[in-house]
Amino acid sequence: MALNLDLAENLDRVRERIERACDRAGRDPSSVELVAVSKAHSEQLIRAAYDAGLRVFGENYAQELAEKADALRDLKGLRWRFIGHLQRNKIKLVERARATVDTVDSIRLAEALSARAEAGGYSTEALIQVNVGEEAQKSGCTPKELPSLVEGVQQLPGLALRGLMTVAPHFDDPKDARPCFAALRRLAEHHGLETLSMGMTHDLEPAVAEGATMVRIGTALFGEREPDRRG
Ligand SMILES: *Cc1c(COP(=O)(O)O)cnc(C)c1O
């Protein structure tokens, strides 16, 4: 994309969308954190986004995350969130970026993350990904598996469980995703968890209406991505 100008405009538009959705819900816009999803975009674009004021970036391929984190270490206060499916043999890459892991979906992954963090003398912030729509092709634990996973994760010394994350099914009318977001909010409330990462370019409004504390926005900020060639 033509860098800084478009980006600043896009960022304004996304912030307006968040503000309007908050207004309608009687919420304070500062209660919704914007995660800029920079997957498939260049380091140069991330630098421009940082200059425009963005600080939190989401990536969903571990190798890509590690490489970008290495290249952008000079950007003070930049933080990474891992939002893709994580295989245990890729934990080292996520660790290199000091990223939070927003997609914990099994106790085996959680244990491996915790062990790594403990060995390094730190703790990793984590969200559990819930497949609220129960779609076969999506990752995340099922709502039924959640209670035991929450309990297990909370016992791990190297993980700090902050909340839940979901990717809603795609609906032509984004309002139709609202029941999924409501379901995630209720699950979080039930477990006393505060962070709710839900809402993307297409469905940020219904997510904010249902209490999202974190929205993950790629396309509305950076434009369309190249088709994924990583298979
Ligand atoms: C790509 C991605 C996003 C951002 O999606 P957009 O529709 O481009 O805003 C958010 N969350 C996850 C998990 C993603 O993989």
Image (cartoon, rainbow, N blue to C red):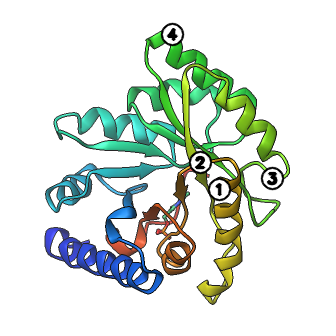
In terms of image quadrants, where is residue 223? Answer: bottom left
* 16 up-or-down from 121: above or below: below
Q: Position of residue 171 (x, y in %)?
A: 67, 82
* 177 up-or-down from 135: above or below: below
* 145 up-or-down from 175: above or below: above
Cβ atoms under marks 2 and 1 closer than 8 Å: yes
Q: Residue at x 67, y 71 (%)?
A: 182
Question: Mark 1: which amino acid?
Answer: Glu
* 72 up-or-down from 210: above or below: above
The residue where tag 1 is placed is: 189
Q: Secondary structure at mark 4?
A: helix
**Disc 3 to disc 2, how far (Cα)?**
17 Å
Disc 2 versus disc 4: nearer the observer: 2
**Disc 3 to disc 4, how far (Cα)?**
30 Å
**Disc 2 to disc 1, how far (Cα)?**
6 Å
What's the mark number on residue 193? 2
What's the mark number on residue 119? 4
Q: Residues within 10 Å of mark 4 (few under 14, many from 20)?
A: few
What's the mark number on residue 142? 3
